Image (cartoon, rainbow, N blue to C red):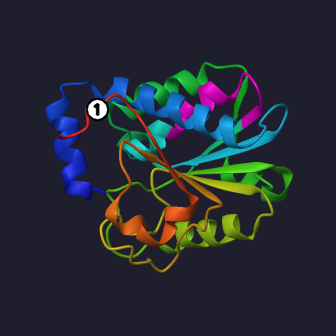
C-alpha cells in the first residue's frame, strides 16, 4: 500500500511524462473493467473534474468507446486543466464516438456503468455543495459504479470520508492500492501504469 505523497514521488521519479502515464492509466482501467464486466454495447457515463484523475477518465473513455456508447460529463473548469488532462480533454472533443454532455443534460438512470473520475489522491477537506450533490445523485443510480484510482470523497491516506463520497462497486487503483482503501480491499483491483515497483 502507498500514500498519496509516495505515489506522487514515484510518478516524479519515474521520468515518464504525465501524458504517457494518463494514457497508460486509461488503457489499463478500460482493460480491467472489460475483464470484469461485459461493456459491449453498454451505455457508459464518465464524470470527470479538472485534476489529473479527470485526465485519466478522459483517456479511459477513448479506450471504452470502441465497445460501448460513451458519454463524458465534464464538471470542472476547463481553464484549470493542466497540460496532460487538457490534451486528453481535447482528444475527447475530437472523437466522434464520444459525446460530451453538460451535467444538466444527463439522466443518470440512462446508464449501465458510471465511471467516477472526479477526485483522485489530491482531495483534502470538504467537497463544495454542487459537487457533493452530484456525488450523492450518482450514488442513487442503479448503474454499475466504478472509481478511477480512489472513490471521490475518500481520503487516500486515512480512508476518512468527506461530506459526500462516491460508493463504488469496483475501484481500479493505479500502480498500487492507496492506504485509505483498506476497507475497500474486496472491491479493489490494482493495474500497472508503467511505473516500476519499489524494491
Closest to the observer, 117 or 197: 197
- Does residue 12 lie above or below 8 as drawn? above
Whole-percent x and y of residue 5? 20, 55
Q: Which residue is mark 1?
A: 195
Give left or right: position of 195 versus 42: left
Q: Quadrant of the C terminus?
A: top left
x 54%, y 37%: residue: 29
Q: Is residue 164 magenta?
A: no
Residue 11 occupies quadrant: top left
- Does residue 98 lie above or below 35 as drawn? above
Give left or right: position of 35 versus 143: left
Give the magenta-colored segment's residue range: 57-70
Whole-percent x and y of residue 39? 77, 36
- Does residue 91 lie above or below 151 as drawn? above
Closest to the observer, 177 or 146: 177
Residue 144 occupies quadrant: bottom right
Closest to the observer, 172 or 94: 172
Q: Secondary structure at mark 1?
A: loop
x 58%, y 26%: residue: 92
Q: Quadrant of the N terminus?
A: bottom left
x 35%, y 25%: residue: 19
Whole-percent x and y of residue 154? 43, 69
How many marks on residues?
1
Amino acid at each position: 500500500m502507498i500514500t498519496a505523497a509516495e505515489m506522487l514521488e514515484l510518478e516524479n521519479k519515474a521520468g515518464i511524462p504525465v501524458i504517457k502515464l494518463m494514457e497508460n492509466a486509461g488503457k489499463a482501467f478500460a482493460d480491467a473493467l472489460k475483464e470484469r464486466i461485459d461493456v459491449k454495447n453498454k451505455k457508459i457515463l464518465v464524470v470527470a473534474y479538472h485534476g489529473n484523475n479527470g485526465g485519466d477518465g478522459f483517456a479511459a473513455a477513448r479506450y471504452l468507446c470502441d465497445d460501448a456508447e460513451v458519454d463524458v460529463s465534464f464538471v470542472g473548469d476547463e481553464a484549470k486543466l493542466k497540460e496532460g488532462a487538457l490534451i486528453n480533454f481535447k482528444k475527447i472533443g475530437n472523437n466522434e464516438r464520444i459525446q460530451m454532455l453538460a451535467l444538466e443534460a444527463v439522466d443518470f438512470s440512462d446508464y449501465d456503468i458510471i465511471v467516477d473520475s472526479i477526485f483522485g489522491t489530491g482531495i483534502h477537506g470538504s467537497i463544495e455543495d454542487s459537487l457533493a450533490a452530484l456525488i450523492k445523485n450518482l450514488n442513487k443510480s442503479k448503474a454499475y459504479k466504478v472509481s478511477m484510482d480512489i472513490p471521490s470523497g475518500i481520503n487516500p491516506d486515512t480512508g476518512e470520508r468527506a461530506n459526500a463520497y462516491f460508493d463504488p462497486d469496483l475501484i481500479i487503483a493505479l500502480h498500487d492500492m492507496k492506504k485509505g482503501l483498506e476497507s475497500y480491499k474486496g472491491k479493489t483491483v490494482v493495474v500497472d501504469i508503467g511505473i516500476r515497483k519499489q524494491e
